[in-house]
Structure formats: structure tokens, C-alpha cells
Image: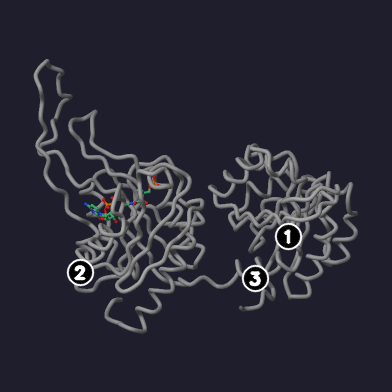
Amino acid sequence: MQPIIKKKILLGVTGGIAAYKSAELVRQLVKAGAEVRVVMTPAAREFVQPLTYQALSGHRVYVDLFDAQADSAMDHIELARWCDLMLVAPASADFLGKMVAGYADNLLLTLCLASRQPVAVAPAMNQQMFANAATTANLEQLQARGVLVWGPDAGEQACGEVGPGRMLEPAQLLANIETQLQPGKLQGVEVLLTAGPTREAIDPVRYISNRSSGKMGYALAGAALRAGANVTLVSGPVSLSAPSGVKLLRVVSAGQMHDAVMRAVANSDIFIGCAAVSDYRVDGEADHKLKKSTQAMSLQLLPTTDILAAVSALDKRPFCVGFAAETRDLEKYALAKLQQKNLDIIAANLVADGSGGFETDFNRLEVFWPGGGHSIAQASKPEVAKQLIDLIGERYTGALSDNPSTT
Ligand code: PMT
């Protein structure tokens, strides 16, 4: 593992007895060569004096929104942008709830909202509070939004109870930070990916589409970006914002998605087809709204071009990753698509058993490549995306050395 020398860590401390352990974390981070700035919530000051963190980090500690604004060198937005990673440790139940709700009534919450960098939280609370459905739901929501949740540990608690809720030890948090800040596997690699549904018009007001929300594809775009890639995202109509830094090309129909991909593909090293592209379009879209009648009506459907197959058939093709959305026989159908579309990787999800797929915040994947495979267990889509991008990075680098012609 590469050291974290000169990496910038913003450590947020909220009100909890584990705040004393964060002082040790600051010491270990500084010893490892990181630059550390500490932001405390007002409640955290009830447990540890700012001076402790100031002495250990060698920098003033920020507590109030107006402290940061008064510091001309670093206002609260700059502080959020300054860091490579933000870690809230300990993260109290109250703070996590406010993060979920988007509160910004103290400096640390404002920074969480303003951060473009990875944000991690290390929950610490009484085991009963941790087991409460509200805490569980809050942590799930944060994970679904891409916040890294580290811990908690189980064991004896300050209140005398035993169970899950202890903050991870400083050494473990340091190890997590080191892992998180390793240089991405896709530094400088051009990634082109599709996401969301397509819409095939029947008339000016009606269309055929599917339930894709774009969440999986947008999570992949974010994960590829964080792995160091330059990302172009061709997206069907969804109500999501693209991660900042991603080049977004909006399309509506399968034909438009095909054309946008074909224009962009020459520059790409990796193509990921995550969109739920309509397999059929309506033959002859009506110019005007079709009138209701009592008669049965039929639509003539024509197949659309398979974008993924077209990309993988190019003479100079990128490394091709497809998805398979199946309601049964996942492995059988996925392996058939891997072979028929001549893919390097296929990521298959079951879309009928409630474990993931369309619309949900969670997913799980069975990933196959010629001669191998790997399962990604159910997790938030950002977490699943990170694991898939890591895998793609490994296979892509391997493919480069094994078979340079695939680039
Ligand atoms: O968007 P979400 O709500 O988060 O849901 C995520 C998802 C379920 C849509 C996603 O994980 C997924 O499975 N995407 C692929 C959906 C799909 O169309 O699967 P398929 O098995 O029908 O298609 C196989 C592959 O061919 C896919 O990579 C697809 O992008 C591609 N394809 C299909 C048809 C077509 N005309 N062109 C294509 O490129």
C-alpha cells in the first residue's frame, strides 16, 4: 500500500465519548504524513477541548460556521474542497440523522453538504440507539448516496452495555483511509458508459420505456471518476444529477443513444453498457396524438440496434463491459450474452427477486468473464459500483498485458 504522505484529511468530530479516540487518530494520521484539519460540532466540545486536536494536528480547530468564514485563508466551502477525504469520527446518531435530512446548522454539517470528495462516517453510539430502525434507515440512506460507513465495532460500551455501536479503533480507521486513498486503478483511462432507460415514442405524448432509474449507471460513473478515469456518460431520461466532473450526454431514444455512443467511442478505452436500452421501437411514430377508440389496437415494433454488440464488433474496440438484467437463469443467460456480444465482462443482476436491479438503492451482481467470475454481494449501488469498477480495472489492466489488441 502506498503511504498517505501529504494527503489532506478533514476530520469531523461530533459529540460522543469516542471523541477522545479521535485525538489518537489525529496523532496517527500526522505520524503517517497526512495533513489534518479538525472540525468539531458544538456538542463535541463537551467531550474534548479543541486545544487537544490543535496541539496534535498543528492547526487551528474549526467549530463555528463563522470561525471558518472569518478565516480569510479558508472559508467553509474551501475547507470542504481542500481535503482528499472527509471522515466524521465519531459520528453520533443525531449527526447522522441531520446528514440524511440535509441540515446545515453547524459547520461540520455544512461541509458534508458542500464536499465533492469522498465522505466517510464512523458511527459511535449506544447499542440500542444503533439497533433502532431510524439509525439503520439513516445509515442505509447515506450508503445509498455514496457515503462510506466505517463500522461500528461491537463490544463493551462506555455506558456499560455490550453490543454493536463502538467507534472503530484509530488504527482501523487509519487503515481504511489508506485503502480509500490509494491511487485509482483507472488513472487517465477514458470510460464511456450508458445509463438509464430509453423512450421509444408512440405518438407525441406516449412512449414505450422501462423502470430503469439510472442509479446503477450514475453510481458507476462516480466510481470510475473516483478511480481516476475521464468519464463520458450517455444517459437516457432520468431525474438524477451526474457526478461533477463527468461529461454528460443526454439522449431519449435507443437510436439517439446509439448515435451518441458511436460518436464518442473512438476516444474510449472502456465501454460499459448499463443502460436498459429498449429492444424495440415503434414502426412509424404518429405525428399527432392517437385518438381513443373502442377497437383493439396493435403497434408494429421493430428491433433497435444493439449498441453494446455494435461497439464490441468495432475493429478498434474498447474493453467492453455489458450488463444482463434477468428474471431467471441468471448465469445461463449472462454467459450467453457474454459470448454472443463478444464481451470482456458481463455483470448480471436478477431483477425480479427484490435483491436489486431496477429502481432500488441496492443491488448485487454476478460478474463473469471468459473463464472466470466473481460475486458482488448485496450493497448500496455506489458500493457495488466501486467493487465492479475495481474488478474492471483489474481485468482491463490484465487484458492490456495479455492482449494489447483489445485496446
Ligand atoms: O437504472 P437502475 O434503476 O439503477 O437499474 C439498473 C439496471 C437494472 C438497469 C442495470 O443494473 C442493468 O441491468 N442494466 C442493463 C439492462 C438491460 O437492458 O439488460 P439486457 O439484458 O436487456 O441487455 C444486455 C446488455 O445489452 C446491456 O448491457 C444493455 O445495455 C445492452 N443493450 C441492450 C439492447 C440494446 N438495444 N442495446 C444495448 O446496448
- Foreground label between 3 and 2: 3
Tell me the kind of residue under disc 1.
Leu
* Vertical placement of residue 282 versus 343, above or below: above
Using the image, determine if residue 148 lies above or below residue 206. below
- Mark 3 belongs to which amino acid? Glu
Label 1 neighbour load within 10 Å: few <14, some 14-19, many 20+: many
The mark that comes first in sequence, 2 or 1, is 1
Q: Are marks 2 and 1 in contact (CB under 8 Å)?
A: no
Residue ID for mark 2: 314
Q: Residues within 10 Å of mark 2 (few under 14, many from 20)?
A: few
Q: Residue 244, how many percent across, how many down?
A: 50, 54
* Lateral position of residue 194 relative to residue 176, left or right: left
Q: Nearer the viewer, residue 284 or 16?
A: 16
Q: Where is residue 299 shown, x and y percent of the image? A: 11, 33
- Find numbered disc 1 in the image and state the secondary structure of the residue it sits on: loop
Going 38% across and 65% down the picture, which residue do you hit? 191
Choose mark 2 or mark 1, whichever is in front: 1
* Quarter of the figure with residue 189: bottom left
**CA separation in Å, label 2 and label 1:** 49 Å
Q: CA distance from mark 3 to mark 2?
A: 40 Å
Q: Where 265 sits versus 303, above or below?
A: below
Sequence-wise, which precedes: disc 3 or disc 2? 3
Q: Which residue is mark 3?
A: 178
Q: Which residue is mark 1?
A: 168
- Alpha carbon distance from label 1 to label 3: 15 Å
Closer-to-camera residue (344/111): 344
**The C terminus - image quarter:** bottom left
Q: Residues within 10 Å of mark 3 (few under 14, many from 20)?
A: some
Farthest front residue in view: 162
In the image, what residue type sits under mark 2?
Answer: Leu
